[in-house]
Image (cartoon, helix red, strand yellow):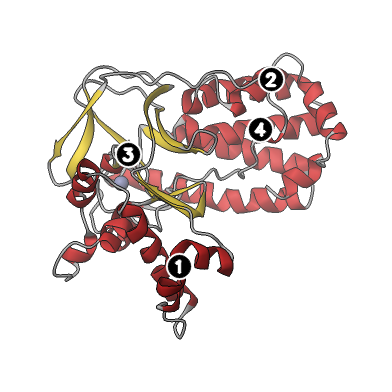
Amino acid sequence: MQHASMEMREDQEPLGSFSPCTLEAEGPKPPSSIVASSCYEVRPIPGKGLGLVATRTIHPGTLIIDEAPLLLLDPPCKRNDILKLLGCRLFSSINMRTTPDQIRAQIHQMILEKLVQKLDQPQLQLLYSLSDKTVELGAKAKSLWGIWQTNSIPLGSYRVSGIFPTVVRLNHSCHPNAHHIWDAETGREQVWVVEGVRPGQEITISYVRTFCSKSFRQSLLKEKFGFLCTCQACSLTGGASELDDKFRLEIDRLAQQFSSAKQDEDINLAIEIGERMLFLMQEVGFNANVQWPGFFNCFELYLLVGDMEKAQFYLSRAYELVCKAQGASSADARTMRKYKHNPEQYLQDFKTSDKHFIASLTHC
Ligand SMILES: [Zn+2]
C-alpha cells in the first residue's frame, strides 16, 4: 500500500451523507454478499510496493474482500473506561502535561501494545512486514506506532480505526475502480469493485477526497502519504487535464451551494444544482459509489416538489448505482427496492417516522 495514515479519507459524496437506510429496509437482513474468489493477487507494483492486481475480469458490483481487522482500535471515551482497560500502572504513566492530541496518541499507543500481545506469530509477521513512513522520515527502525499511522484506516468515524491484512495492500488512484466500506454489523471491512476491471489491471481505492485540482491532490498525497500520484487522472495533460480540473473544482463549489440551497429550503435551486453536479460527475467519470447519493438526493427533492416521474427516475438510477457500490443485499439497496415502485410511500413513511423530512435534508 502506498503510505496511508489516520488522516486517510474516503471519497466523500458532495451531495451530503444522508443515507436512505435511516428508514427501515425491506424485510430481514439477507445473508452477506458472497465474496468473489480468486479474482486478484497481491504482487509488486513498480514504484508503489505491493498492490492488488486482477487475475480475471471483475464486473462492477463485485465484492472482492470481506475481512476482519488484524488490529482494531476502538478507544473508550470515558476516563474510567480507559483506566479499566489500561490498568492503574499504565494509566498513571500517561503524561497529562501536554496537548490533548498527544495525550490521545499516548493512550492509543498503549491500547495498541496490549492488542498486539494477543496476536499470534503469523499475524505479528504480517504486521511488521507493513511499511512505516516514519522510517523514511528519519526514524531508526520500524515501530508499532509508525506502522499504525502508516496503514490504519478510519472505520465509519475517525474515532475507530483498523489495519486489515489485504485492504492495506490497495493502492490509491484519483480515479479508483473500487471502494472500501466498514460493515459495523459484521465487524468486517468490505471492498467492492465499482468499475469493470480487466485481467492484469490494478485494483485501486481513493485515499483522499478528489473534488479538487490535480496540483492540489498531488501536493496533498505527497504531504500526507509521501508519494507522487501517477494515476489515470493525474496523467492527463494539456486541455484534458485543464478540463478535468475545471469540472472537479466546479463540483466542489456546487457542493457548497447545494448545502446552502437545502438549508434555505430552496428545493428548486437545490434540484438545479444537484443535476448539474451529477452531469459533471459523469463527465469526470466518478464511480457509482460517488454518484449514488447524488441521485438519491435528487429523488428526495423531486418527491418534495411532487414530480413523481422524475422522483422515480432518480430512485431507479440511485438503486442501480448503489447495487454496484454495495451490492443488492445492502441496507441502502433494500430500502430503495422497497420504494422503487411506490416512491410516494417514502414520503409517507418519513412523515410517520420520528424524523422530519426537510430537517433530514437540511442537516445532511
Ligand atoms: Zn492521481
> Which residue in the structure is indicated by mark 2?
26
Query: Disc 1 residue type?
Result: Gly
158 relative position to 275: left or right: left
**Mark in the foreground, 1 or 3:** 1
**Mark in the foreground, 1 or 4:** 1
What is the count of numbered marks?
A: 4
Query: Disc 3 residue type?
Result: Val
Q: CA distance from mark 3 to mark 4?
A: 25 Å
Kindly state the secondary structure of the residue where label 3 is placed: helix
Name the residue nearer the viewer: 21 or 106.
106
Label at residue 196: none
- List x then y, in percent, for residue 122: 20, 41
Q: Are marks 2 and 1 in contact (CB under 8 Å)?
A: no
User: Counting other residues with Cα less than 10 Å from the Cα at mark 4, is it few (<14), some (14-19), or many (20 or more)?
Assistant: some
Question: Between disc 3 and disc 4, whose residue precedes?
Answer: 4
> Which residue in the structure is indicated by mark 4?
21
> Which residue in the structure is indicated by mark 1?
87
Which quarter of the rendered picture does the N terminus lie within?
Answer: top left
Label at residue 167: 3
- List x then y, in percent, for residue 37: 30, 18
108 relative position to 346: left or right: left
Kindly state the secondary structure of the residue where label 4 is placed: helix
Query: Disc 4 residue type?
Result: Cys
**Mark in the foreground, 2 or 1:** 1
User: Counting other residues with Cα less than 10 Å from the Cα at mark 3, is it few (<14), some (14-19), or many (20 or more)?
Assistant: many
Kindly state the secondary structure of the residue where label 2 is placed: loop
Q: CA distance from mark 4 to mark 2?
A: 10 Å
Question: Between disc 1 and disc 4, whose residue precedes?
Answer: 4
Q: CA distance from mark 2 to mark 1?
A: 45 Å
User: Counting other residues with Cα less than 10 Å from the Cα at mark 1, is it few (<14), some (14-19), or many (20 or more)?
Assistant: few
